[in-house]
Image (cartoon, rainbow, N blue to C red):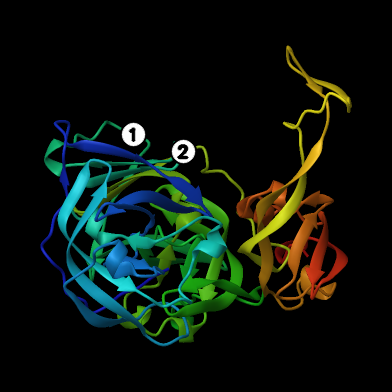
Amino acid sequence: MFFFNNLGFSQSKFVIQNKKETVKIPFKLINNIIIIPVEINGIELSFLVDTGVNKSIIFNFLNISDSLQIKNTETFFLRGLGEGEAIKALKSKGNILKIGDAINVDQELFAVYNPNLNFAPRLGIPLNGIIGYDLFKDFVVEINYTSKYIRLTNPSSYTYKNCNSCETLEMEFYKNKPYIYSNIVIKEKQIPVKLLIDSGGSDSLWLFEEDSLGIHPGNLYFEDFLGHGLTGSVYGKRSKIKGFSINHFNFNMVNVSFPHPESLIYVRQHKERNGSIAGNILKRFNLIINYPDGTITFKKNRHFYDPFSYNKSGIELEQDGLRLVKQKDYDYKNTDDFLGEYHQGSKTTVVLGTKYKMELKPVYSIVELRKDSPADNVGLMVGDVILTINGKSTDKYDLQEISHMFYEKQGERIKLEVERNGVELTFVFYLEDVFEQ
């Protein structure tokens, strides 16, 4: 979801420090995007892997120059997706960046201090930065969405395996970002499109409206929050298109978003671009991305036939701090207060007594609410803190588990207990699929 432009490139390079000239890095897949561990100047952080960016950035650190020893800086202003203004960043050279056994001892970074640029609450896990071109330019990169790992290999040591079911496409590059040609079908019309490969986006497809080409959402769509860009929130239309294909790989009734033009001012500098292929399509394949040769190989995996679903509630959540939750402590034993026993497999645990303990648990708040959505229509509001969902306390779930409940089938009943200005309220609504009405 990020876009940098008109920034210079250093000649720094990653080197793999082992004899096999390859390294395997596990990742977390959150909302269809890839999060990997990255070490910068000896400090371990979490980075988003985003083929849609051409520079590495870190953000939201207090005393960042001291903790990461970031020096040799100069001021830059970065622009990207979103409706806001350019943000201030410090460009720093000579940083040591390590990913597994791959190391770059002269990494250029852009450090952003803007406190509003914080993606961790929307993901539910810490996120300290983004890396794209700087990682991909030196390696053949395998992304295995099934087993959740990335493998980096020196191009001179990489051997392709025979794969009759794979599709290999040539990539074109614009400002060091990869593009491929594919086809969409809108109202029975097949349209060739040039799309950015965007592993940092969680949607399926983004398309830029162009009436002369027949690229538009038609009459069946709804306005929605699409995500966060570098310079602000992105809003647009959510719809479906009849078909999408990457060579011989075909999808039917695919989710598509049409971002509003005001969010795309800097993105549309590449006039030939028609949109993006994002994580909800990419995760259906295991990929081999070879920047040095300019190719990408697709091999479908077990996610290929996963249904395309939308958030049918209208609610967008974020993790909004922590709260103290009172819970029973079954580790506490009091021989004077026998309560009983419970069985687990071949083991029997005798509970002699209980005592309550207080634990810090995440708070989940509504931060976006789609107008005329099921949640909006029953009176839920931005700022409401969700206490329980379908009768179960939200401290039993992580953010992704709660959000996925809003993607269930048409007609699913959702009961929420929320706190609003110190008052507890209960709301019941049913999920609605706009495209099945």
Q: Tag 1: residue type?
A: Asn
Where residue 305 sits: x, y (%)?
A: 56, 43
Left or right position of 77 against 340: left
Q: Label 2 neighbourhood size at 10 Å, few (<14), some (14-19), many (20+)?
A: some
* Identity of the residue drawn at 49% across and 82% down: 211
Q: Indicate whether 51 appears above or below 142.
A: below
Q: Tag 2: residue type?
A: Thr
* Identity of the residue drawn at 77% across and 28% down: 333
**Residue lying furthest top:** 346
Q: Which of 180 and 139 is in front in this view?
A: 139
- Quarter of the image that includes the N terminus: bottom left
Left or right position of 96 against 316: left
Q: Nearer the viewer, residue 274 or 56?
A: 56
Mark 2 element type: loop
Label 1: which residue? Answer: 164
- Quarter of the image that includes the C terminus: bottom right
Where residue 395 sits: x, y (%)?
A: 71, 51
Which of pointers 1 and 2 lies earlier in the amino acid sequence?
2
- Observer able to see residue 98: yes
* Identity of the residue drawn at 65% across and 53% down: 360
Where residue 182 sits: x, y (%)?
A: 38, 60
Label 2: which residue? Answer: 146
Mark 1 element type: loop
Separation (CA) of disc 1 from disc 2: 19 Å
Mark 1 or 2: the one toward you: 2
* Identity of the residue drawn at 44% across and 47% down: 249
